[in-house]
Amino acid sequence: MSELSRITETPVPTVKYYLREGLLPPGRRTSPNQAQYDDEHVRRIRLIRALLGPGGLDIATAREVIAAIDSDLPLPHVFGVAQRAASVRVDDRAVDAAALERVDALLDGFAIHPENPGRIAAAAVLEAFDAVGQRNADDWSRRYVEAALIVAEADLDTVERRVTRDEKAETVVVGTALGDALFAALRRAAQEHVSTTRYEPERADEIRRARSTP
């Protein structure tokens, strides 16, 4: 275990915690007090840290998605587990029916389940837009749908490049959890770029030069 801790740069107490919580499979027992760990354990620890860190999942949710990776569930079902894990919990009973209708109009033709967490969360967001006076957000939302389709194609193209079912399932989970964080981060960068070039074009070259300077 000390070697596993060293390779993964994870403290031994943390490795033991992952074992106790069922996130990490036990090693092959070589004596009453010794176990052997391999590359799969290294890979799994790195996955766990990614899900708990940048992915923002808690222990229970990480355990759920890791179980989905290790199961024989079809990939669409693994996507469902990952989406629910990475999504803000919204009670669909509290969402206005009119907001759901607006989302369904935006997603016209999409093959999604009525309980898809994205559908429900989007309706709650549209309600919030209305509540703060942003009632003309439909064109904004349509452009978001176009961007979301591009991102979803990128997600699935990446999954398809994996070979085994386990590799594909792991990419589904990691891509869903970390992809949300990556897209939000890149959106922040893009917002600054567009706002600067649009409203302060004279600063754009200055900023680019500053970034390129060692």
Image: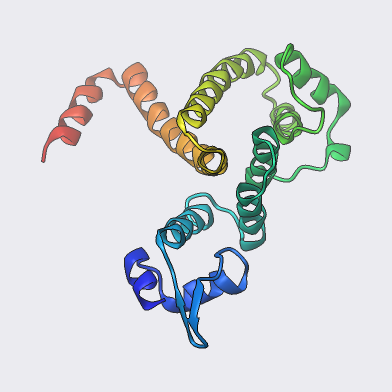
| Quadrant in the picture for residue 92 | top right
Q: Is residue 55 left or right of residue 206?
A: right
Q: Residue 107: image x %, image y %?
A: 71, 17
User: Total marks drawn?
Assistant: 0
Which residue: 42% across, 76% down? 1
The quarter of the image holding the C terminus is top left
Q: Is residue 10 above or below residue 90?
A: below
| Residue found at the very far left of the displayed protein | 214
Could you say which is closer to the camera, residue 51 or residue 147?
Answer: 51
| Residue found at the very far bottom of the displayed protein | 32
Q: Residue 91: image x %, image y %?
A: 82, 42
Which residue: 51% across, 27% down? 160
Which residue: 41% across, 74% down? 11
Which residue: 55% across, 74% down? 17
Could you say which is closer to the camera, residue 45 or residue 39?
Answer: 39
Could you say which is closer to the camera, residue 209 or residue 172?
Answer: 172
Q: Is residue 214 left or right of residue 211?
A: left
Q: How is the image coloured?
A: rainbow
Q: Is residue 49 above or below residue 119?
A: below
Q: Residue 94: image x %, image y %?
A: 86, 39
Q: Is residue 153 above or below residue 31?
A: above
Q: Residue 13: image x %, image y %?
A: 47, 79
Q: Is residue 55 left or right of residue 84?
A: left
